Amino acid sequence: MKLTGSELRRLTLPIGVCLGLVVAGAACYFTADGYRTETQAMQAATAARRSEVQSKLARATEEEREILENVHQYNALVARGIIGEEKRLDWIDDIAAIKNARQLFNIRYDIDAQRALDYPGFAAGSGVDFMVSRMKIDMQLLHEEDLLNFIDDLAKRGKSYLSVRSCNVLRLDRAAAGTLLSPRLRAECTLDLITIRNKPA
């Protein structure tokens, strides 16, 4: 079917309108696709920021929990007397009290002058000094449990952290032991009494 010139002229406007609508539709599609891509990118960025904020909040909450836990531990150490100057007179009183409470035999001891802690591989933290007073104990025992109870009581009552460096238990001669309630063992121990001292500001 052939169109005449007059028919083509009449179709010019509808064809132009149709082409205009096609172009407008394509423009709308690409514009909408651009908006969609931009919106997806914004959503991804927002999700990443939200995840980062949540991660920071979780870290801050964990740090706050750790700080509170450290404060409680610090206060517990202060209450026990581990933080601060050495409590040499308290140690002497504690030994006498344990000896009387446990009804132990003779206890002889010597406490060295306080000095900086020098354990191998130990590194002190900033702001505090770890100090040690070495105690040598020579005590007579009825049985080994007397020694274990003495060390346990001193660790619980003492105003320091107690570290046992060495203990040597010897059996006394039966003739020297004498009666049933005479000492049968002798213990020679070296204990470290450790305190923590804040460095001057």
Image (cartoon, rainbow, N blue to C red):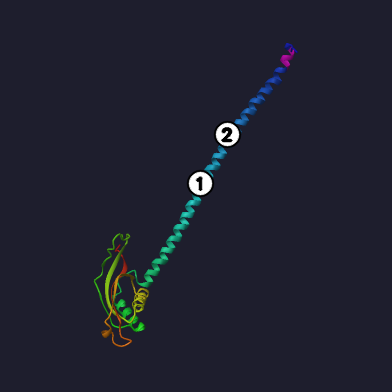
Report which residue position mark 2 lands on: 34
What is the quadrant of residue 121 in the picture?
bottom left
Q: Is residue 193 above or below residue 4?
A: below
Q: Amino acid at mark 1?
A: Arg
What is the quadrant of residue 88 in the picture?
bottom left
Q: Which residues are magenta?
A: 6-10
| Most common SS among magenta residues | helix
Residue 79 in the image: state x and y as whole percent.
Answer: 38, 72
Task: Tell me the residue at 54%/39% (across/down).
Answer: 41
Q: Is residue 97 above or below residue 70?
A: below
Report which residue position mark 1 lands on: 49
Q: Nearer the viewer, residue 72 or 91?
A: 91
Q: Amino acid at mark 2?
A: Gly
Residue 125 in the image: state x and y as whole percent.
Answer: 33, 60
Dot label at residue 20: none
Task: Tell me the residue at 46%/55% (across/down).
Answer: 60
Please say whether residue 182 is one of the residues in the magenta stretch: no
Task: Tell me the residue at 61%/34% (across/down).
Answer: 32
Q: Is residue 181 above or below residue 2?
A: below
Residue 153 in the image: state x and y as whole percent.
Answer: 36, 76
Q: Nearer the viewer, residue 37 or 113?
A: 113
Mark 1, secondary structure of its residue: helix
Spatial CA span between label 1 and label 2: 22 Å
